[in-house]
Amino acid sequence: MKILMVHPHDIYSLAEPWAVRIVYFAKEFEKKGHTVELAYFPLEWNRQKAWRLSKNIRLIPLPRKHGPHILISNILVLWRLAARVDIVHLQKCFYHAAIPAMLAALFRGKHLHYDWDDWEVKIYEVSTYPSLLRNVIRKFLSILENTIPLVADTVSVASRRLKIECNKIIRRGDMIFDAHVGADLKQFNPLVSGLAVKEKFGITRPLILYLGQLHGGQYVELFIRTAKKLISDYHQNLSFMIVGDGYMANDLKKMTNNLDLSRDIIFTGAVSHELVPQYVAAADICVACFEENEVTSCKSPLKIVEYLASGKAIVASKVGEVPEMLQDSGVLVAPGDVESLASGVIRVLSDSEFKDKIQKSARKRAEEKYNWEVTASNLLKAYENRVVKNKNYRL
C-alpha cells in the first residue's frame, strides 16, 4: 500500500515534539512492507528539498508561511503526490495542512483518513489569552475540527472522549478506529542507563522527574508545588527534574525561585527525543500531573507510555485515558491536588517491594498494548478494509 501522510508541524523541531507520532507510524508502516510519503511543515523554511528518511519513507517539507499563494502551491504539491497513493492520512486540523490534504484526497478520489489525537480547540482556549483575534481563530479552528471528520472516509481517535466527540459529528461508529498513543519499545526500555544524566547534573539524591512541554494545559506548577510540600512538609531529601521547554518556562522558574526550590529543581530545557530515554532512566519516580477538564479528558499522554516502556514507577493524575493506560502499573492520584500527588510519591518511596512490582508491570503493559506497532496495526486495518471496499465498489 502507498500512503501519503500529512502533518502540520515540524517533525524535527524540539519545539514541536508531538510530531513524533506520525514519524513512528511511518516507520511501522515501512516495517510492514508499505511505502510512505510524509509531508510536513518546518518552522523555518529555507526551500528544503524532499529526501529519503529510509528506503520506503520519503520526506517532503512544505512552507508554513501564510498567504493564498503558499496555500495554493501546497494544494498543488499534495494533489500531485496523491495521484500515486492509496491513502491520504492527515493528522490534526490546522488549515495550512488540512485544507491541502482534504482537497488533494477529494480531487483525486483517494481514501482520506483523519488521525484525531487531541482536541485542538480546547487546547487553544487554555493556551491563549482572550481577545477578538483569539475568538476569530478559535471559531475557524472549531469549524475545521468539526468538518474534517465529515469529509474523511475514516477517523482514528487517541482517546475514548475524542471517540464520543467524533460520534456526535459523524454518527458512524464503523468509521471510527482506536489509535492510542504508543512508545518505542527499543528506544525506551529498562536497560537504558541514566548514569550520564545524573553525572551531568550532579544528582546524588532520589530523582523525581516530570517530562513534557512547559505551556498551558500541562500543569507543571502542580509538580513544583508538590516538590515544595515533599521537601518542607514531608522532609524528603529529593531532587526534582523538569524535562522540556515552552513559553511558560520563565514563569515556572520564577515560581521555583520564589518557593526557594532553585537548588532542588533542575530545568533541563528542550531535550532531543533520542536523549529522552536517558533522562527517564535517571529517575526514581516519573510524574504525570494534570487537572480535570475538557483538555485532559481527551489526553492520551505520550509521557506515560514512555514511562511505562522504560519500566519506571509512575505517579499520575486520574484523568481521561490515564487510568486505562496505567491500570495496576502505577499510582493514580486525585487531579489538581498537591497533597494527593505528594502522598503518591511517598507511597512509592516508602515501599520498595511495591515499587519493584509496578515497575515490572509497567514494562509489561507497554509490551502488550501501548507501543507503536499495535497502534499502527489498528490503522492499517482501517485502511485495508476501506481500500478493499472501494475497489469492490468500483468493480
Image (spheres, rainbow, N blue to C red):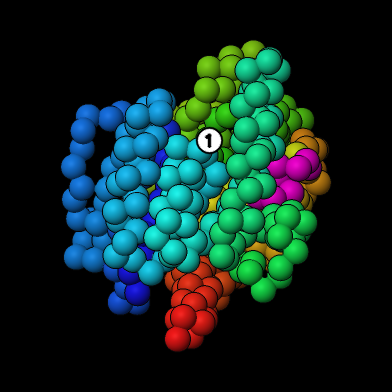
Split into 4 quadrants, where in the image is the C terminus? bottom left
Task: Determine which quarter of the picture holds residue 177.
Answer: bottom right
In this view, 193 is above or below 259: below
Q: Residue at x 56, y 72 (%)?
A: 369
**Magenta-colored stretch includes residue 188:** no
In this view, 301 is above or below 180: above
x and y percentages locating residue 269 in the rendered image: 43, 29
Residue 198 in view (yes/no): no
In this view, 182 is above or below 8: below
Does 388 sit left or right of 298 as displayed? left
**Magenta-colored stretch includes residue 297:** yes
x and y percentages locating residue 354 in the rendered image: 68, 64
Q: Secondary structure at mark 1?
A: loop
- Of 155 and 197, nearer the camera is 155
Give the magenta-colored segment's residue range: 292-299
Quickly name the residue at label 1.
213
Does 153 sit left or right of 96 as displayed? right
Q: Residue at x 44, y 64 (%)?
A: 109
- Of 242 and 155, nearer the camera is 155
Q: Residue at x 34, y 50 (%)?
A: 78
- Of 216 and 283, nearer the camera is 216
In this view, 260 is above or below 235: above
Task: Determine which quarter of the picture holds residue 116.
Answer: bottom right
Residue 154 in view (yes/no): yes
- Of 339 and 31, nearer the camera is 31
Amino acid type assigned to the residue bearing label 1 in the image: Gln
Tell me which secondary structure the magenta stretch mostly adopts.
loop
Split into 4 quadrants, where in the image is the N terminus? bottom left
